[in-house]
Amino acid sequence: MQAAPAGKARVTLMNITVIGCGRWGTFLAWYLNRIGHQVTLYGRDQSRRMEVLRETRSNGVTTLPESVTLESDLSRALENELLVISIGSQSLRELLREIRSLCPAEDKNYVLCMKGLEIGTGKRLSAIVKEEIGEKARAAVWLGPGHVQEFTRGIPNCMVIDSESEALKERLVAELSGDLIRFYYGRDLIGNEVGAAAKNVIGIAAGMLDGLRLSSLKGALMSRGTREIARLIAALGGSELSAYGLCHLGDYEATVFSKYSHNRRYGEALILGEPYEELAEGCYTVKALLKLGADTGVSLPISQAVYDVLYQKADPQKTLDALFSRSLKNEF
């Protein structure tokens, strides 16, 4: 992973469509507009989130200026060449099929701002773009730590852009960098995508520890979680060093500790028996990770423990006790 040159000027003004009007998608529209691009934010007509944005220009965290266009007609939204996608990862394939039916989809550049793997196949999201749009499709991923609540308060962070296309990657790093986000050039698409998706599973485990008042075990969770995912990345053909970069370990503070982390809060709420309605991508990703582990023969004990609690009704206390007894006896 290579840092982008500090202070490099943006090359051109772009017309960008952000697809997805959730909290992150709305922030992306705000940020991209803030650094000088012309931005359209797309959300479906029936979306309550889009209704609120039309009425108030705010979702309670991010307030959009009038210069951001709100659009509910996907055909019109697709007139822009750069599509920044921020939706639930399991909905990506369906969206791409809809895009393909409405426009010359291979002419677009796709920037995936979500962290996940397809449940049934274990496939990475950039691979799904290739499958649905075609081998010539130009796709990049925008990954790394950061919460909307902090960015909108002016707190900066570092993130990663990666792509099979060096030209697209360089263009995006140059044109999407601003004072709030410094981008690094990713050099391992497999490792970055798998690592970014997997950190959400670690976040759920961290929330379970919080709910059980075992937060002191988060150090062991971070150490063993990074090693577990590094082995999987290597088995899939990526660099295990990616697990120690911004996509995974570098995102732990924002996922394992932050009060804003959906996955951590979901895990904690589950233990405490409290309702939690926000999307926790780790619930889906854990299924895909276990498929990849089975396919490659890599043991994923933390992922297995999270799966057992979520889907097999395993006792959380006993499951996590057994997990850390095992891990600490066999650290390397």
Image (cartoon, rainbow, N blue to C red):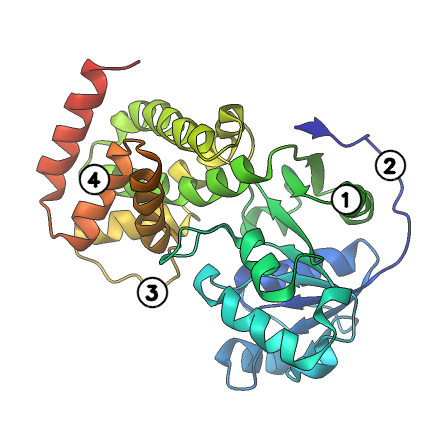
Q: At numbered mark 2, what does the secondary structure look like: helix, strand or loop?
A: loop
Q: Secondary structure at mark 4?
A: helix
Percent coordinates x, y for residue 156 in the rendering: 66, 39
> Does the residue at mark 1 contact the one at mark 2 (Cβ under 8 Å)?
yes
In-image side of 175 versus 269 (left or right): right
Q: Residue under label 1, please give it.
A: 177
Q: Position of residue 42 (x, y in %)?
A: 64, 74
Checking the image for residue 290, the label placed there is none
- Name which of mark 3 and mark 2 comes first in the sequence: 2
Which residue in the structure is indicated by mark 3?
277
Q: Looking at the image, is mark 4 or mark 3 earlier in the sequence?
A: 3
| Image depth: mark 4 or mark 3 in front | 4
Q: Amino acid at mark 4?
A: Ala
- The secondary structure type at the circle numbered 3 is loop
Choose top left, top right, bottom left or bottom right for residue 111.
bottom right
Residue 74 appearing in the image: yes
Among the two numbered marks 1 and 3 on one chain, the one whose residue lies closer to the N terminus: 1
Nearer to us of marks 3 and 2 is 2
**Label located before the other in sequence (1 or 2):** 2
Q: Is residue 62 visible?
A: no
- Amino acid tagged 2: Lys
> Which residue in the structure is indicated by mark 2?
8
Disc 3 crowd, CA 10 A, few/some/many (<14, 14-19, 20+):
few
